[in-house]
Amino acid sequence: MSRRIGIEVSHAAAEAVALADVEVIAAYPITPQTHIVEDLAEMVNSGRLNAEYIPVESEHSAISACLGSSAVGARTFTASASQGLALMHEILFAASSLRLPMVMAVANRALSAPINIWADHSDIMPQRDTGWVQIFAENGQDVFDLMLHAFRLSEDSRVLLPVIVSMDGFTLSHVMEPVSILSKEEVDSILPPVTFKERLDVNSPRSIGPFGAQNVYTEIKQQQEAALVEAEVVLNEIWTDFEARFGRRYNPVEAYRTDDAEVILVTMGAIGETARTAVDEMRETGIPVGLARIRLWRPLPCEQLVSILENVETIAVIDRMMSPGAPGGPLGLELRSVFYDREKRPKIIDFVAGLGGREINRKTFKEAVKQAQALKKQQRNYSLIDVRSL
């Protein structure tokens, strides 16, 4: 039976990885993900977890080691953040293109310069097009559950792609929260053993990822894209099964009080819970506002986004990264693309907030809704919100 305990969210992530019987962990310490891999190192050292722990000299080496372990059929895990994730960047493309299952936890943190250790999404957004499935957690329970779902999804024969589970650094990764920890028997009931059909074998040598000329490269990329799109279907199956077993439901996009809303806030990550409280407070004053929290970032759940957002007058997007030189942040730009050729096109106004860990609170969301209502008939569609001035 599951047990509900108070636990640091980073440790909840490590608990999920251990319960999944991960076989190889390759990691390099970087704030704020270090507590995850430190906890796993202690489990391996104590004998609680029977896994190979590979301490490497850099994040580039960590993800490279993960490619090798996955290629031979081992259940594989790593974690990173910020500059470390940026250092992994070139190898992330290889992991997805080679269709190598693995899971990575990312404790989202701002990129330098200047050096900043606090949460925003400037580390994960440049990884958008690497071909990894990318899921955002909102609280500690999300982190624990989604780590387990990530292994099952990654290793499904219809997918065979690496998966990132993102959690906001410090504001989520380092807080204590009540989390229901599944028993080993419960985890085993939803996560089958690894059974890769294609893997490297010293007794039957072969190559993977050889040179691909013009006559095959496009076809390989088409297959990779088809698997990434299929991942949404498979993930929904996993979430339906999980709800039936344990009563907790996850969706690619979580809608809250959107049915009669005139303005809908759109968020990703831990700020969604604060946004939900702000929505309730605004509703009490007669402001018809709702909230859409995006959980699945890649593949982007376009149809669900349209079904939730197409009938609203105005969408107020909260981005946690600037896209330099562009009229908005990554999430706002993507939503404009989703609605570009739709008959119903809401006014989409993008607000960049919370850079480098700057506070995002209920005032932030109320100001975004206020500005969105004022700007919905103007050409302006981009604003930077600083809570210190509110």
Image (cartoon, rainbow, N blue to C red):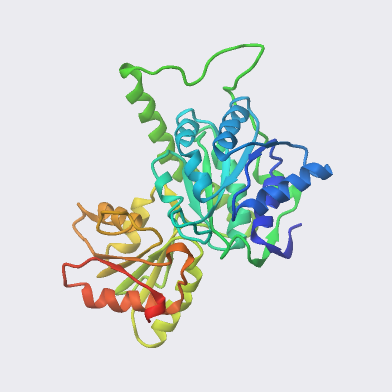
Q: Residue at x 58, y 42 (%)?
A: 103
What is the residue that sits farthest to the front in this orientation? 114
Q: Percent x, y for residue 40?
A: 72, 47
**Which of 353/218 is in front?**
353
122 left or right of 196 in image: left
Q: Residue at x 52, y 33 (%)?
A: 160
Q: Percent x, y for residue 348?
A: 26, 64
Q: Percent x, y for residue 333?
A: 29, 55
Q: Residue at x 57, y 30 (%)?
A: 67
What is the residue that sits farthest to the bottom in this orientation? 285
Q: Is residue 262 visible?
A: yes
**Which of 358/5 is in front?**
358
Q: Residue at x 44, y 83 (%)?
A: 281
The relative height of residue 43 versus residue 290 in the rendered view (above or below) is above
What is the residue that sits farthest to the right in this orientation? 46
Answer with the quarter of the image where residue 214 lies: top left
157 left or right of 344 in image: right
333 left or right of 84 in image: left
The relative height of residue 307 versus residue 73 in the rendered view (above or below) is below
Q: Quadrant of the C terminus?
A: bottom left
What is the residue that sits farthest to the top in this orientation? 204
Q: Is residue 244 visible?
A: no
Answer with the quarter of the image where residue 243 lies: bottom right
**Which of 380/181 is in front?**
380
